[in-house]
Image (tube, helix red, strand yellow):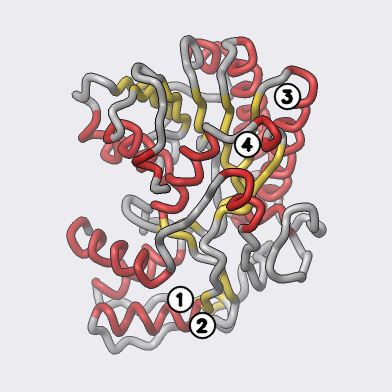
Amino acid sequence: MHYTELSFPSNTLFLITGGAGFVGSNLCEAVLKMGHKVRCVDDLSTGKQENIASFLNHPNFKFIKGDIKDLDTCMKACEGVDYVMHEAAWGSVPRSIEMPLFYSLNNIQGTLNMLEAARQNKVKTFVYASSSSVYGDEEHLPKEEGVEGNLLSPYAVTKRCDEEWAKQYSKHYGLKTIGLRYFNVFGRRQDPNGAYAAVIPKFIKLLLNDERPTINGDGKQSRDFTYIENVIEANLKACLAPDEASGEAFNIAYGGREYLIDIYYDLTKALGKDIEPIFGPNRPGDIRHSNADISKAKQLLGYDPQYDFARGLNEAIAWYRENL
């Protein structure tokens, strides 16, 4: 079943934190298209006003500029809310190594504030973004929930802590929590700029400008790149997950495996460019290989990703051509 066929009662109100970010703004758009109400919270520290500009005059959309590190903001944001999709966080493994205290405050305390606000406001389901980084140095492929290794970055620590806190709220307070471990999400509205930009939009932008991208390491790292449409589906299906899924975390990916060097040459071909990459040093804290077992999400959430890597990449390229 595609997510557009999911059935929520009329007047359902979704709170989307980090709603002006890449994943959040796509969730806002999907929920509005389904005819439901969206309340979006974002402090615009990494999210962008332009990502939500087209929704601002929509009668079902309300934007709150606020910070999840502030409990009062979280409490007000959760008033009357049916479902929370908590995307607000600071990403980037290397940046977290430079800013551990900020990551703890933002990603752990901020999530804890949201969990408490959701509990007090009797939210039906609290869906939150976790990350494949929680697998750390565990080398087993495909990555399977329950088989995690030593964490390799402060960012990974924050996501593991979020999962543990969510479990406690599920166990002691009866709040239905569902964690989604995203694997390398890409697609429309992902920011190609800055030192910490994700690899696909960064490569596309540089190639379109006839510049040489840098690949960290030898390019033989593999990732389970996951198109944004699959992530939207996972979030909406998680809202309706059965009680037995509460307190659990799920791999959200396509279940494929792509090598960075292959992606690079796929992009040069698709964009009609003959540009060789520069090879730089490995990034600290990076996982070498990543590939997800998605059977648990299929079984308990009904997750059924429709976009394989090639289909997603074609859509992403088309979007960046038009919008960069």
For disc 1, the neighbor class at 10 Å (few under 14, some 14 to 19, many from 20) is: some
203 lies left or right of 167: left
How busy is the neighbourhood of tag 3: few (under 14 within 10 Å), some, or many (20 plus)?
Answer: many
Asked whether the residues under the numbered discs 2 and 4 touch, taking CB atoms below 8 Å apart as contact, a structural biologist would say no
Q: Mark 2 to mark 4: distance in Å?
A: 39 Å
Q: Position of residue 120 (x, y in %)?
A: 62, 10
Indicate the amino acid at tag 2: Phe
**Relative horizontal placement of residue 126, taking residue 266 as reference (left or right):** right
Residue kind at label 1, given as amino acid type: Thr
x then y, percent, for residue 281: 60, 76
Q: Which of marks 2 and 3 precedes in the sequence?
A: 3
Residue at image mark 3:
169
Disc 2 or 4, which lies upstream in sequence?
Answer: 4
Are dots 1 and 2 in contact, CB under 8 Å?
yes
Residue located 48% across and 60% down the image: 226
Drawn side of residue 193 relative to residue 161, left or right: left
**Secondary structure of residue under mark 1:** strand
Q: What residue does disc 1 label? A: 214
Of residues 38 and 150, the one nearer the viewer is 38
Are the residues flagged by discs 4 and 3 in contact, CB closer than 8 Å?
Answer: no
In three-dimensional space, the C-alpha distance between marks 1 and 2, rounded to whole angstroms, equals 6 Å
The type of residue carrying mark 4 is Ile
* Mark linked to residue 178: 4
Q: Amino acid at mark 3?
A: Tyr
Can you say whether 6 is above or below 186 in the image? above
Q: Which residue is mark 2?
A: 279
Q: Name the quadrant containing residue 301.
A: top right
Please give the name of the residue rendered at 24% of the width and 31% of the height, measured from the top-left corner. 55
- Residue 300's disc is none
Disc 3 or disc 2, which is closer to the eye?
3
